[in-house]
Image (cartoon, rainbow, N blue to C red):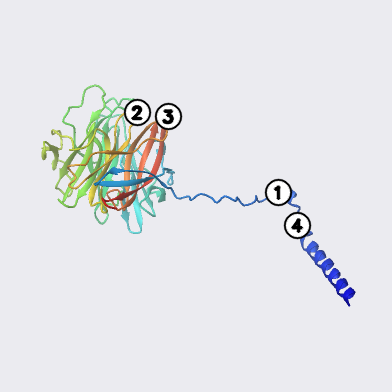
């Protein structure tokens, strides 16, 4: 009986091996596979979500975590992407989509699924919606950058823009004398009125090309005082207000010696209290800090982006540098986008340009705000 059991077990093993051979006989030898699948990496992939890079702030006032930077692509095939961003980014909701305006010498309009640049899907329309440049004698012959756009009612939008005069005949150097204007749309920003100046420098434009004027603006609606507030630069940061819902020419008053008394067109101006020299301010109301937040950039070949907060939009905290270039250049043109470009909560994104003499990179970082005690 013992011999019979051993014989049966040997036959079973033989049949099993023959079966396995039959199943695998048509499989190629591993060395003959045209695209062999590599063995799994024993080291797990790193978390793709950016991590906190560093923390900035003022003890007892505010702090913010700044996350690692990421490159921003060109999701809508924007034609001037090599020079973007070139000013404040404006975005606003429209039903279940968001409309974004790309500010350049001629401004474009796009639509997307969220308020963030990377989620914009298409230029709509494909052609520019505002601005342009040409060899004619005008305050905007060098272009009009549509910087801040708001819905007034239904399809009616109001837009505030930075304009450049490149002299006439127009100089090829790009040297600009700047001013700020207002324009209106009745079709959600697809087309715009011609536009008119609302803020100009107290200095007269010189005969020969020279950098100057009042421009590089952003505008917010001060919901506490029911007025527009325009922040702009002329080497330093300045401000002006209008209590007219249409922000019409002649209704603007510049901040001067502690009050809004000087006319927007040509009036005198005093620097915004507390801020350091710089340009391209971007301001939003932060619902977490319950303060206004401003970012702007300084001057020089290694300029950085600064941040300050304010309870009233007039008097600002000590500026803190928050972002510098990662390639030995300068960080410019920052915009914080949370719910929109004019309102954010605890977590938002800050978009900016990392620039060198050879070009610029469009970058984004997550920024998370904390109140004292958090």
Q: Nearer the viewer, mark 2 or mark 3?
A: 2
In this rendering, is residue 90 above or below 354?
below
Can I make out residue 366 in this image? yes
Element under disc 3: loop
In percent of the image, x 32 and y 56: which residue is there?
A: 94
| Other residues around mark 4 within 10 Å, as few (<14) / some (14–19) / many (≥20) | few
In this rendering, is residue 146 above or below 178?
below
Query: Mark 3 and mark 1: span between their CA atoms?
Result: 43 Å
Is the residue under label 1 in contact with that under label 3 (CB below 8 Å)? no
The image shows residue 38 at horizontal and vertical percentages of: 65, 50
Element under disc 1: loop
Task: Say which residue label 3 marks.
Answer: 358
Is the residue under label 2 in contact with that under label 1 (CB below 8 Å)? no
Query: Mark 4 and mark 3: span between their CA atoms?
Result: 55 Å
In the rendered image, the quadrant that contains the N terminus is bottom right
Q: Residue furthest top?
A: 208
Between 201 and 8, the one lying in front of the other is 8
Task: Say which residue label 1 marks.
Answer: 34
Which comes sooner in the sequence, label 3 or label 1?
1
Which comes sooner in the sequence, label 1 or label 2?
1
Between 5 and 314, the one lying in front of the other is 5
| Other residues around mark 2 within 10 Å, as few (<14) / some (14–19) / many (≥20) | few
Task: Say which residue label 4 marks.
Answer: 27
The image shows residue 31 at horizontal and vertical percentages of: 74, 48
Task: Say which residue label 2 marks.
Answer: 301
Q: Nearer the viewer, mark 1 or mark 2?
A: 2
Query: Mark 1 and mark 2: span between their CA atoms?
Result: 53 Å
In percent of the image, x 42 and y 29: which residue is there?
A: 358
């Amino acid at each position: 009986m013992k011999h019979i059991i051993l014989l049966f077990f040997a036959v079973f093993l033989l049949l099993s091996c023959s079966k396995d051979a039959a199943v695998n006989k048509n499989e190629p030898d591993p060395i003959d596979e045209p695209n062999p699948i590599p063995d799994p990496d024993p080291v797990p992939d790193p978390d793709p979500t950016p991590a906190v890079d560093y923390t900035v702030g003022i003890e007892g006032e505010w702090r913010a975590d700044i996350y690692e930077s990421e490159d921003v692509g060109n999701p809508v095939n924007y034609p001037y992407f090599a020079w973007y961003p070139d000013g404040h980014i404006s975005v606003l909701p429209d039903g279940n989509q968001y409309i974004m305006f790309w500010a350049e010498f001629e401004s474009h309009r796009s639509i997307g699924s969220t308020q963030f640049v990377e989620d914009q899907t298409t230029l709509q329309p494909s052609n520019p919606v505002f601005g342009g440049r040409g060899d004619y004698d005008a305050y905007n012959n060098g272009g009009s950058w549509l910087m801040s756009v708001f819905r007034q009612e239904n399809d009616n939008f109001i837009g505030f823009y930075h304009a450049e005069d490149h002299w006439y005949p127009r100089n090829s150097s790009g040297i600009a004398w700047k001013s700020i204007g207002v324009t209106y749309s009745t079709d959600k920003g697809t087309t715009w009125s011609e536009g008119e100046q609302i803020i100009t420098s107290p200095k007269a434009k010189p005969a020969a090309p020279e950098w100057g004027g009042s421009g590089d603006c952003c505008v917010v609606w001060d919901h506490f005082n029911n007025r527009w507030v325009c922040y702009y630069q002329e080497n330093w940061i300045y401000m002006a207000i209008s209590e007219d819902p249409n922000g019409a020419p002649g209704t603007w008053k510049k901040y001067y010696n502690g009050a809004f008394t000087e006319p927007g067109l040509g009036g005198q101006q005093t620097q915004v209290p507390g801020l350091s020299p710089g340009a391209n301010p971007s301001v939003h109301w932060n619902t977490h800090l319950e303060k206004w937040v401003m970012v702007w950039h300084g001057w020089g070949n290694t300029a950085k982006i600064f941040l300050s907060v304010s309870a009233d939009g007039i008097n600002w905290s000590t500026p803190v540098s928050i972002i510098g270039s990662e390639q030995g250049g300068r960080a410019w043109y920052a915009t914080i986008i949370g719910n929109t470009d004019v309102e954010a909560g605890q977590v938002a994104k800050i978009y900016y340009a990392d620039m060198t003499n050879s070009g610029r990179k469009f970058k984004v970082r997550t920024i998370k705000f904390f109140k004292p005690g958090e």
